[in-house]
Image (tube, coloured by chain):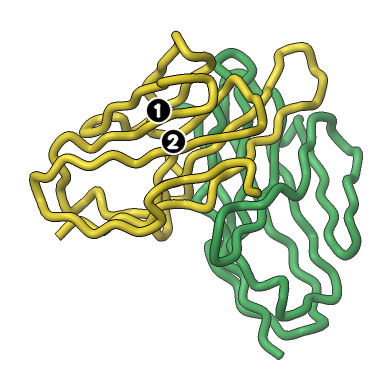
Chain colours: A yellow, B green
């Protein structure tokens, strides 16, 4: 079974609709992230959460909101979808520590391909 | 503003060639630099670099970090068509724990 799962894997929606992308992990990590990927722009951070009570905006949080329902679940919502939110969305987790343990790898879900018409 | 820049953005080579991908960074609180390979799915981890001058090696892939000049390179020798992918470089910030990605280098290896 995959350690980081995302649902749905593909979604087509219309402008103005509210949609939610869900992410679950079985790695037991505290830290979870949402990224979007656009051609030529690499991965850009939308929101990140260091634990259930900690939510932080990333580089491009406008138009998005998140919910950390549990350690294992982190959802991304588009309140009113617009066409320029068409992208590939990745959830990731890590057990990054500041003690120099070397556990600084992020583990990515399979991605959700979103098309906003 | 923290930023990570990769070059070239795209590269086409033939099997057997050696390629060098570049990643430069300007960040306020560098902690480590990571390389990922992305095919038609999620990125997969390749290397993590924290110290200058120490080469990390995995088969035909190797990478090194220069913290004085603020860059890293990823070398792939004797390329194969299976090396075709997007290669992503990212820098971990020690103060915020954020990971800043470069734009990626798209590598195409032709038979």
> In which chain is the residue bearing label 2?
A
Asked if residue B44 shows in the view, the reply is yes
Reply above or below: A61 against A117.
above
Q: Residue at x 54, y 41 (%)?
A: B101
Above or below: residue B77 compared with residue A72: below
Residue B103 to residue A21: above or below: below
Between the C-alphas of marks 2 and 1, the distance is: 5 Å
Judged from the image, the secondary structure of the residue bearing numbered disc 2 is strand
In this view, the residue in front, A35 or B11, is A35
Q: Residue at x 41, y 21 (%)?
A: A68
How many C-alpha atoms fall within 10 Å of the one at disc 2: few (<14), some, or many (≥20)?
many
Identify the image quadrant of residue B12.
bottom right
Residue A34 numbered mark, or none: 2
Pinpoint residue B106: horizontal percent, then vertical percent: 56, 66
Q: Which residue is mark 1?
A: A47
Give the number of marks: 2
Q: Are marks 2 and 1 on the same chain?
A: yes
Residue placed at 42% from the left, 50% from the top?
Answer: A37
Marks 2 & 1, CB-CB < 8 Å contact = yes
Kindly state the secondary structure of the residue where label 1 is placed.
strand
Residue situated furthest bottom in the rendering: B111
Which of the chains bears the disc numbered 1? A
Residue A63 picture quarter: top left
Nearer the observer, B18 or A77: A77
Q: Residues within 10 Å of mark 1 (few under 14, many from 20)?
A: many
Q: Tell me, yes or no, if residue B24 can be seen here.
A: no
Residue B30 position within the rendered picture, expressed as x and y whole percent measured from the top left: 66, 24
Q: Quadrant of the C terminus of chain A?
A: bottom left
Q: Residue furthest front?
A: A1
Residue B91: x %, y % from top left:
62, 34
The residue positioned 53% from the left and 27% from the top of the image is A72
């Amino acid at each position: 079974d995959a350690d980081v799962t995302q649902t749905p894997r593909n979604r087509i929606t219309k402008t103005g609709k509210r949609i939610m992308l869900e992410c679950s992990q079985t790695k037991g990590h505290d830290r979870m992230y949402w990224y979007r990927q656009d051609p030529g722009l690499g991965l850009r951070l939308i929101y990140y959460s260091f634990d259930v009570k900690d939510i932080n905006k990333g580089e491009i949080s406008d138009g998005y909101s998140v919910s950390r329902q549990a350690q294992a679940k982190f959802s991304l919502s588009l309140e009113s979808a617009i066409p320029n939110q068409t992208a590939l969305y990745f959830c990731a987790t890590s057990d990054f520590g500041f003690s120099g343990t070397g556990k600084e790898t992020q583990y990515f879900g399979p991605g959700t391909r979103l098309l906003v018409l | 503003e923290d930023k990570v820049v990769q070059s070239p953005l795209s590269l086409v080579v033939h099997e057997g060639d050696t390629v060098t991908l570049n990643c430069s960074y300007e960040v306020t609180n560098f902690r480590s630099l990571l390389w990922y390979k992305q095919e038609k799915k999620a990125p997969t981890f390749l290397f993590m670099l924290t110290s200058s001058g120490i080469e990390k090696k995995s088969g035909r892939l190797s990478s090194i970090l220069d913290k004085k000049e603020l860059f890293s390179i990823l070398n792939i020798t004797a390329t194969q068509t299976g090396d075709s992918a997007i290669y992503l470089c990212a820098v971990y910030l020690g103060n915020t724990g954020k990971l800043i990605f470069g734009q990626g280098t798209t590598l195409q290896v032709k038979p």
